[in-house]
Structure formats: structure tokens, C-alpha cells
């Protein structure tokens, strides 16, 4: 693509037109912001630098989204730039920039996924080794979750069933599973987990449609995100109704199961500026939940006297969604 001094396309080949999702002539003279969403500022900065200082010594990789896409996905374009000037001019006056790019998204995503898997595998191994040195199973729970949070989520919650069960009835065929808070990161900024496994945790009062309750009923992972726009008050109200920290935008609930019983749910939360949880995140959360469930089960077995799940609780009216 040839870009003029006003940062508008002046000539486009077929490859660039396909990458931008429109015809070659339809691109000419349009502002780059009409063609690209995310990444347009970085591209315009690079073009401006080339016009002023000349081409960079090496290609650069730009992550962009194309506005013409029905569901904009991030793409990685390996880009090179050449400053264009007229040989007839006495002084070097730049006429524009030649922008050459190649879509390398698949290769970069594969590299990122491989690096992510290596990191998470290492975290799991370190967590298992650290938890093996814990005499208190409650401490082992926090160890597993503290290692899992690194680079993965901002907050974690552990909610335990007052009575473990092999399975729960589908929605509408039984009462709402009653969950009590077992461990949590402090409100506000992320930090180390606090546990309440030694005593009776507080009932959380989740409603039937809450993701944690749905995870218990499905015996699987449930993902959810805030989709109400940029209104902070509405987002905070959504988080408050779910009994989550007010800055929450994305949540992932994974069920805790051990010895054929459902023990509760672990919930991972992400705040603004982070991507929603995807399928690979759900798989990682489920692997963490398996180790946490083993520690929770051991903590229940070793608890002296009547277990916390046998204590009566005051009624707590669940919220409605």
C-alpha cells in the first residue's frame, strides 16, 4: 500500500485490499481510522515517523483489528516501511510512505499459546511442590490459587457447599445449592488469599442464575463477562449483584470435585483492560480446581469436631437477576 503525506491510501494492491476486507478503489483517500480499529494509532505513529526520519532499520509487528470484519479479531501484520520522495526535487520532500505488510497472525498466536502453556505448566509444578510442604490443607489451597493467579486473573474466590453431594439437580428441579465463602482475595487491589476454612464461612446468597450455581449444577466451567458498554456505574452494579469486586468485568467459575463429590466452586475474576476468559483459560482453571478440591477435601476430613458443612446457617435471600 502507498500512503500519501496525509496518511491516506493512494495505491493498494489486491493482497492489501483482501486484508482490509474491501475493494481496492474503495480504500483510496480514506482515513486509516475508517479502515482499522485497534492499532490504528500505532500505525499512524509509525508512518509519521517514517515521513520525518526515514524507514526503521527492521520490520515491525503491528496488532490491528479491521473494521470491515463482522467480528473484529486481532491480527498481527509484519510491516516494513519505505519513505517516498521525488528525485526531481532539490530538497528531499517526502511524498508518502510505501507500507509493506504480511499477515503472520497464526504463527504469532501459536508462539503465544506455546509460551502460555509452558508458563502455566511451570506454575502448576511450582504450586504442587510448594503445596506438598504445607502441613495445613487450608494453606495448600491458598498456595495453589496464588500461583494460579499470576498472569491469569486478578482475584479468586472459593465458595464451598454446605453439604457436599455427588451431583445436583438441573435448574428448576431442586433448591438452589447453598454456598458459603471459604477463601477470597481481599477487595480492591489484588492480593494474597484469605481463608475461612477453619470456621464457618458466611453464606454468599447466590441466586439460581449465578455462574457459580450453574457451574455446580453442570459440574463444569462457566464463563461470563460484562457486555453493557463503558458505563462504570452499571458495570459496578452488575459486579455487586454477583457478589464480586466492583471492578470485575470477566469471570470464570470451575467446580471443585473430589472422591465423586461436588465440594464447591472456585471463581477467577478479571478487571478492566483484560480479555475475557477463553476455552484454554477454562481448561487451565479446571486443572487448578482439581488440585484445590483435593486440598479442600482433606481440610474437611481433618477438621476437628463437627464440620463446617454441618453447621446451621441463618437464611440468606438470594438476589434476583
Image (tube, rainbow, N blue to C red):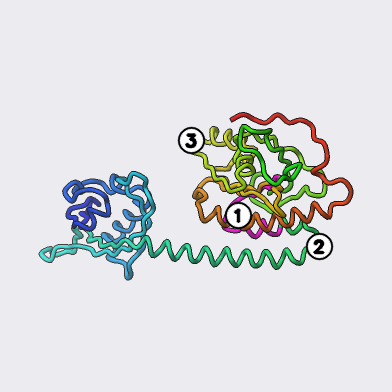
Query: Which residue is disc 2 drawn over?
Result: 135
Measure the C-alpha gap from mark 3 to mark 2: 45 Å
Residue 248 numbered mark, or none: none
Query: Which residue is disc 3 drawn over?
Result: 228
Furthest-bottom residue in view?
Answer: 57
Of labels 3 and 2, the one closer to you: 2
Q: Dot 3: few (<14), some (14–19), or many (≥20) neighbours within 10 Å?
A: few
Q: Dot 1: few (<14), some (14–19), or many (≥20) neighbours within 10 Å?
A: many
Of labels 1 and 2, the one closer to you: 1
Measure the C-alpha gap from mark 1 to mark 2: 24 Å
Where is 168 relative to 304, above or below?
Answer: above
Badge count: 3
Circles 3 and 1 in contact, beta carbons < 8 Å: no
| Residue 191 % position (x, y) | 67, 52
Query: Which residue is disc 1 drawn over?
Result: 286
Disc with the residue nearer the chain's start (1 vs 2): 2
Q: Dot 2: few (<14), some (14–19), or many (≥20) neighbours within 10 Å?
A: few
Furthest-right residue in view?
Answer: 305
Circles 3 and 2 in contact, beta carbons < 8 Å: no
Mark 2 lies on a secondary structure that is loop
| Residue 314 % position (x, y) | 79, 32
Is 153 contained in the magenta span? yes
Mark 1 lies on a secondary structure that is helix
Tell me: 165 left or right of 284. Answer: right
Tell me: 120 left or right of 183. Answer: left
Q: Which residues are magenta?
A: 143-159
Tell me: 27 left or right of 222. Answer: left
Hey, which quadrant is residue 105 in on the image? bottom left
| Residue 123 % position (x, y) | 62, 64
Measure the C-alpha gap from mark 3 to mark 1: 27 Å
At horizontal 87% and vertical 45% (from top left) the residue drawn is: 306
Amino acid at each position: 500500500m502507498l500512503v500519501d503525506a496525509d496518511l491516506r491510501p493512494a495505491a493498494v494492491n489486491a493482497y492489501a485490499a483482501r486484508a482490509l476486507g474491501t475493494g481496492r478503489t474503495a480504500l483510496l483517500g480514506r482515513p486509516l481510522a475508517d479502515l482499522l480499529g485497534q492499532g490504528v494509532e500505532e500505525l499512524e505513529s509509525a508512518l509519521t515517523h517514517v515521513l520525518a526520519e526515514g524507514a526503521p532499520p527492521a520490520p515491525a509487528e503491528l496488532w490491528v483489528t479491521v473494521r470491515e470484519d463482522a467480528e473484529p479479531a486481532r491480527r498481527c501484520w509484519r510491516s516494513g516501511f519505505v519513505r517516498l520522495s521525488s528525485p526531481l526535487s532539490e530538497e528531499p520532500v517526502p511524498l508518502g510512505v510505501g507500507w509493506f505488510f504480511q499477515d503472520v497472525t497464526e504463527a504469532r498466536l501459536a508462539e503465544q499459546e506455546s509460551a502460555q502453556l509452558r508458563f502455566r505448566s511451570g506454575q502448576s509444578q511450582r504450586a504442587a511442590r510448594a503445596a506438598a510442604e504445607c502441613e495445613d490443607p487450608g494453606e495448600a489451597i491458598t498456595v495453589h490459587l496464588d500461583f494460579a493467579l499470576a498472569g491469569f486473573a486478578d482475584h479468586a474466590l472459593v465458595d464451598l457447599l454446605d453439604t457436599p453431594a455427588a451431583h445436583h439437580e438441573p435448574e428448576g428441579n431442586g433448591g438452589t445449592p447453598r454456598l458459603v465463602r471459604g477463601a477470597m482475595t481481599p477487595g480492591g487491589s489484588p492480593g494474597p488469599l484469605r481463608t475461612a476454612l477453619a470456621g464457618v464461612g458466611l453464606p454468599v446468597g447466590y441466586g439460581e442464575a449465578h455462574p457459580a450455581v450453574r457451574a455446580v449444577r453442570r459440574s463444569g466451567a462457566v464463563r461470563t463477562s460484562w457486555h453493557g458498554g463503558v458505563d462504570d456505574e452499571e458495570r459496578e452494579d452488575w459486579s455487586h449483584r454477583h457478589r464480586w469486586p466492583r471492578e470485575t468485568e470477566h469471570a470464570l467459575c470451575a467446580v471443585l470435585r473430589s472422591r465423586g463429590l461436588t465440594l464447591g466452586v472456585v471463581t477467577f475474576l478479571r478487571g478492566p483492560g483484560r480479555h475475557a476468559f477463553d476455552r484454554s483459560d477454562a481448561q487451565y482453571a479446571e486443572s487448578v480446581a482439581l488440585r484445590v478440591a483435593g486440598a479442600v477435601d482433606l481440610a474437611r476430613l481433618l477438621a476437628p469436631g463437627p464440620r463446617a458443612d454441618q453447621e446451621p446457617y441463618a437464611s440468606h435471600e438470594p438476589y434476583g437477576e
